[in-house]
Image: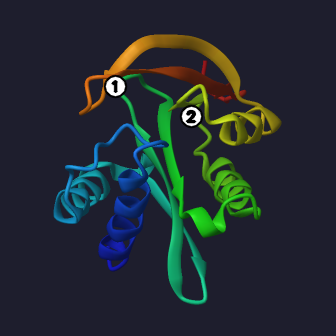
Amino acid sequence: MEDVERIAAGMKAVVDEGRWLATESTTSVEELEERFRQAIGSGGADTFVFVAEEEGEVVGALGLHPTPAQGVLTLGMWLLPRSRRRGGGRALMEAALDARPPHVHKIELEVFPDNEAAIALYRSLGFDQEGLRRNHFRRLDGSLRSSLIMARLFETEEA
C-alpha cells in the first residue's frame, strides 16, 4: 500500500493525456488513490498490482483484479510516455501472467482500437480479440470511443 500515492500520481499523468485510458482528466489523484486502496483492500488473493520503476520513480503499473465471473481476472495497465516502447509493458505483462493463480482460466482487458502498440503487445502474449464495444465510452467533449475486448485463455486444473 505504500506505493499507492506514487501509482496514482503516475496514472494521473497518463489520464491527463486523454488518449490511452477510459478514466477522464477530471478524476483527481486523490480519487485514484482511493480506487487503488479499495481495489487492493477488497480484492483478496486474486488482486495483484505490479509496479515498474526507473531510478526509484514509478513509471508504470499493472493491476489484475477479480471480475464477477469465477476464474476470470481483468487487467489494466499504464506507462508514462518516456517509458513506452522500452520493454516495461512487456515486463509488467509477463509478471502478471506468471503470477496468475492456477484456478484462473482467463485474463481479459479492454484497449482503445487506436492503441496499436498495446494491441500488438497483447497479441504477442497470446491475447485474442473477443469483441468490440462500439461507441462505448462518452468523453467529456461529447465524443464516443470504442474499445476492443481482448482475452487470453489458460488451461486449468479445475473444470
Q: Where residue 68 is drawn, which disc sits there? A: 1
Q: Is residue 1 left or right of residue 146?
A: left
Residue 41 in the image: above or below residue 20: below
Which quadrant of the figure contains the C terminus? top right
Question: What's the distance in space between the residues labelled 1 and 2, CA to CA?
Answer: 13 Å
Q: Residue at x 51, y 83 (%)?
A: 57
Q: Camera-side residue: 26 or 150?
A: 26
Q: Residue furthest right?
A: 124
Provide the residue designation for mark 2: 104
Percent from the top left, x then y, of residue 82?
Answer: 62, 69
**Residue 142 falls left or right of residue 95:** left
Q: Nearer the viewer, residue 13 or 133?
A: 13
Identify which amino acid the numbered label 2 is placed on. Answer: Val
Q: Residues within 10 Å of mark 2 (few under 14, many from 20)?
A: some
Quarter of the figure that contains the N terminus: bottom left
Residue at 62% x, 26% y: name it: 151
Give SS at disc 1: loop
Residue 126 versus residue 17: which sits nearer the camera? Answer: 17
Identified at 69% across, 63% down, the residue is 88
